[in-house]
Image (cartoon, grey):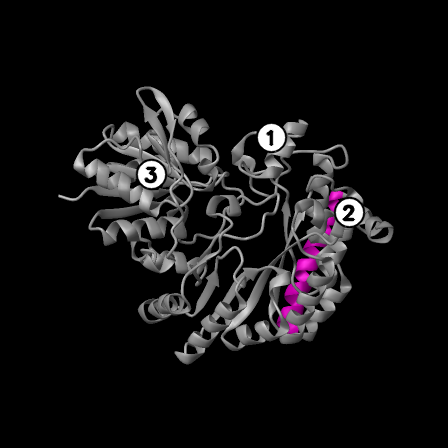
Amino acid sequence: MKLHVTLVNPPYPSERLQHLPIIPLGLGYLAAVLEKNGYEVDVIDCQALKLSHENFKKEIEKRQPNLVGITSTTRTYKSALKIAKIAKEVHPECLTVLGGPHVTFWDENALQECPHLDVVVRREGEYTLLELVQRLESGKKYYDVLGTTCRKNGKIVKNPDRPYIENLDDLPFPARHLWPLEHIRKYEDMFYLISSRGCPYWCEFCAAVRMFGRIYRVRSPKNVVDEIEFLHKTYGAQHFSFCDDVFTVDPHRTEEICKEIRKRGLRIKWGCGTRVDLVSKELLTKMKDAGCVSVWFGVETGLQEVLDDMNKGILVAQTEKAFGWLRELGLRPVPNILLGFPGETKRTAWRTIKFAEKISPEEVSFYNIATPLPGTPMYELVRQKGWLRVTDFDKYDCTTPIFETPTFSMEDQRKIYEQAFQSFYLRPTYVIHMFSKGYTHGISAFRKALSHLIKAIKSGNLIEIMRAKILY
């Protein structure tokens, strides 16, 4: 009889800042590879089902898994360790395995901090987890599996990295059928997919490139659109979002994906994320013709010197040009802004906020507070400089200040993060423009602006915002 594997997405550490439930593609691929090899797999997604640790215990008691595989980000790391502890208490003989971007760079620490954890899987986990299950099934030792960190005779052993998967077309589509799709789609009727792994760029704050490598590996356009068509026909999916770190590294491949979508007559809407230096008006036009409605860009800041410190490798002028094309074509811009990167000051932060309002006057930016994630140069810099103030990973949610520098205090970060949103919605031009789109849009914008105005007055932010707009 084949082994039984239970995969777990741990609950968020608190009620605050819980994202809409989506299928974590990493777990979906793990499940699909295991199923393809004949193993029994089930999933307990605590986030999708809003399960507490106590409720997870009730769920795992109903199963008899030989292996419990858990994923985690930095924010859910401590929650994942609790899951491992509960799994071990309920099923002492099961192998507990933890993977994801956080423990890839926190592997030895995780094993030291949690005696209930048996193995850490680093970087890509599909074939590493498969080999662990095969070893377990055949009764062989697993202490030397590539891409793992584990215990052997009481000591922690860190095995060499497993080579990255070269042909992504070899992977089956994520096993979405193991999730409560009807329940998840009530929150957002969106299907997420990924067409590539890796990123040739090396931003100081990014853990993704260090997780998946600098070699850009891609799925063929046919394979990508096969998945879209499968989801469209099987679930009636019409809205898609590509989770690639950089969707348009290869513009010819992007065009081929668009061509394949049009050739098959798929009437869908989709969005993607990329860099401002990797698009052209011609490419964006072809993307729009194939159903693209929105593009996410890592704008980060409006100052060239800060971009250079981040090792971002783009020019402010390129950002302005790319967003101009989006406005011309009627594509929805989604600018991502990073406030508080080392070297930031109140002046540079406000200049960035004003820049974001300039390039995206109709859509509020996704503001994030710079968060030093383990595995990134930013984390090492902050730690070495003695600037780190918060070590509780539960608070690493990109909205909570984690460190402060001589030029930017945590209190200033908190205030400016809040003021950035208030500044956007309190602009009269925003409300006027929304009324130009229709009465309903206008009334909604007016109410939102009024709500932010009341908050700004109560918090004392209104005068500070007006002053900053003049000074900076």
Give the residue number, with chain letter if any, for mark 2.
Answer: 348
**First in residue order: circle 3 vs circle 2:** 3
How far apart are the alpha carbons under marks 1 and 3?
28 Å
Q: Position of residue 242 (x, y in %)?
A: 48, 61
Who's the residue at 38% across and 42% down the image? Answer: 162
Give the residue number, with chain letter if any, for mark 3.
Answer: 56
**First in residue order: circle 1 vs circle 2:** 2
- Kind of residue at disc 1: Val
Within 10 Å of disc 2 (Cα), the crowding (few <14, some 14-19, many 20+) is some
Q: Nearer the viewer, mark 1 or mark 3?
A: 1
Occupied quadrant, residue 448: bottom right
In which quadrant of the rendered image does the N terminus lie? top left
Between 401 and 348, the residue placed more toward the observer is: 348
> Magenta residues?
439-459
Q: Position of residue 81 (x, y in %)?
A: 40, 32
| Position of residue 1 in the picture relative to residue 254 (left or right) | left
